[in-house]
Image (cartoon, rainbow, N blue to C red):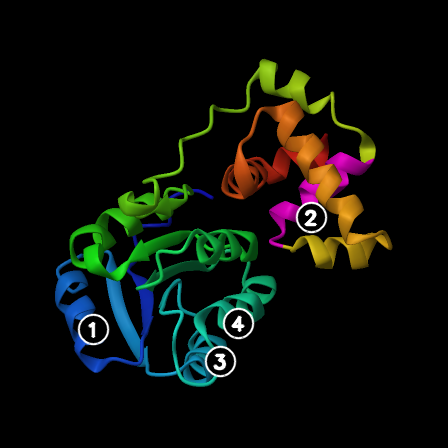
Amino acid sequence: MKIMSERQQTLLIADDHPIFRQGMKQVLEPTLWLRIVAEAESGDSALTQIRYLKPDIVILDIAMPGMDGLEVLEKVRPAYPDMIVVIVTSYDDQAYLERALELGVNGYVIKDVAAENIVQCLDTVRRGEIYISPTLGGRVPKLPTFESVELESLKTLTEMERIVLEKVAQFLTSKEIARDLCVSFRTIQNHRAHICSKLELKGTHQLMSYARKHRELLKSS
């Protein structure tokens, strides 16, 4: 993803705590390239406003009344693949992080450090990188550019592995890919493991970042 144009980017903040929303607004309002257009206090309200306003960037809490933030992300991502979605949450559990990354989140920020990290996070994700709070391991290592060595690496993938990688770039989960390709979930997990091994990628977040960064070249390869 390229850095967005010079026009102001619209932002929606979804969190069930009004004090936290107000705090985020105070931190982000001085950012000249951002314009906060809406707030939501529940997952259902966030989803409704996302569909109506189509903001460029969404900040989502996980624990909200009704639909939680990950459910919102799961519904939003297929319809708006280029929308930037950042989770800001109290959950510092690795399982939540991995699930968010699998669903296609752009950033994952822990609330305890949100005031200090959110601007850096948004600057990072708008460049097409993935940002993770330092308490969870920090920023995802930036992958090298797609040069001749990487093209040779791509050639080591089988046709099925390239198809799976393309679908990862579309923010599809392993279950969704398995359904699309009429194979088992375990088969897709094996393909993902083989892709990571061949491309020397470690973990779900690096696989997603690689696939998204090079999705156009994947289509033509």
- State the residue at coordinates (85%, 51%): 183
In primary-sequence order, the first of circles 2 and 4 is: 4
Query: Which numbered dot is residue 71?
Result: 4
- The residue that mark 1 highlights is 20
- CA distance for labels 4 and 1: 21 Å
User: Can residue 126 be seen from the camera position used here?
Assistant: no
Amino acid tagged 4: Glu
| Quadrant (top left, top right, bottom left, bottom right) of the C terminus | top right
User: Disc 3, disc 1: CB below 8 Å?
Assistant: no
- State the residue at coordinates (80%, 45%): 187
- CA distance for labels 1 and 2: 35 Å
> Which residues fall within the magenta stretch?
160-171
User: Disc 4, disc 3: CB below 8 Å?
Assistant: yes
Relative image position of residue 210 (x, y in whole percent): 54, 35
- The outermost residue toward the right is 182
Amino acid tagged 1: Phe
Q: Secondary structure at mark 1?
A: helix
In primary-sequence order, the first of circles 3 and 2 is: 3
In primary-sequence order, the first of circles 4 and 1 is: 1
- State the residue at coordinates (62%, 25%): 199
Relative image position of residue 87 (x, y in whole percent): 38, 61
Quadrant for residue 103, please give it. bottom right
Report the side of 14 relative to 152 (left or right).
Answer: left
Amino acid tagged 3: Met
For the residue pair 187 and 51, the one nearer the viewer reads as 187
- The residue that mark 3 highlights is 67
Q: Residues within 10 Å of mark 1 (few under 14, many from 20)?
A: some
- The residue that mark 2 highlights is 167
Q: Secondary structure at mark 2?
A: helix
For the residue pair 102 and 30, the one nearer the viewer reads as 102
